[in-house]
Amino acid sequence: MNPHHGSTLDSLYEDLGEQEEVEALAAKKILAIQAGRRMKELGLSTTRLAQRMHTSRNQVLRCLDQDDAGITLKMLFRLSRALEAPLQVDLRVPKGSAYARTRRSRPRMGLHSRRMAGRGE
């Protein structure tokens, strides 16, 4: 009998401890495809892109490698500037998600309470 019958692919990856890697590789694949398209739009070679990014051609090839998810934020921002394409990085918690349900709620402090806490009162 299949122990994962009725479960989602995401839950299977999570059970196997591979969810983060799968998500990182998926995001990197999208990013690499977008970067490649933008390079074509701008008529840039990898050598010229490396010059714009102030880095080596090998580093550019790593940025464009769909199977290498180990790119730093610093390199992403360099890539963004060199491709004249804004980079948006954010964290979102979808309503009703597992993250939203498991998130610990902290008592909110009003403005008055924060002022008092800052004074040690």
Image: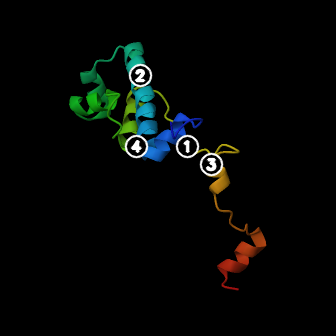
Q: Estimate how packed mark 3 is, as few (under 14), some (14 to 19) or many (20 or more) residues with alpha carbons within 10 Å.
A: few
At a point 60% along the width and 35% down the height, the residue shown is 6
The reply, left or right, for residue 67 in relation to residue 105 is left
- Mark 2, secondary structure of its residue: helix
Q: Are marks 2 and 4 in contact (CB under 8 Å)?
A: no
Give the CA distance from mark 3 to mark 4.
26 Å
At a point 38% along the width and 20% down the height, the residue shown is 36
State the residue in front, 113 or 27.
27
Residue type (three-letter) at the residue carrying disc 1: Asp
Q: Can you see residue 89?
A: no
Give the CA distance from mark 1 to mark 3.
18 Å
Q: Earlier in the sequence, mark 2 or mark 3?
A: 2
Q: Which mark is residue 33?
A: 2
Quadrant location of the C terminus? Answer: bottom right
| Residue at the farthest bottom position | 121
Q: Are marks 1 and 3 in contact (CB under 8 Å)?
A: no
- Mark 3, secondary structure of its residue: helix
Q: Earlier in the sequence, mark 1 or mark 3?
A: 1
At a point 68% along the width and 79% down the height, the residue shown is 117
Q: Which residue is mark 1?
A: 90
Percent position (x, y) of residue 95? 70, 44
Give the CA distance from mark 4 to mark 1.
12 Å
Q: Which residue is mark 4?
A: 73
Q: Which residue is mark 3?
A: 98
Percent position (x, y) of residue 55? 25, 35
- Mark 4, secondary structure of its residue: helix
The reply, left or right, for residue 57 in relation to residue 24 is left
Location of residue 56 with respect to 111 vertically, above or below: above
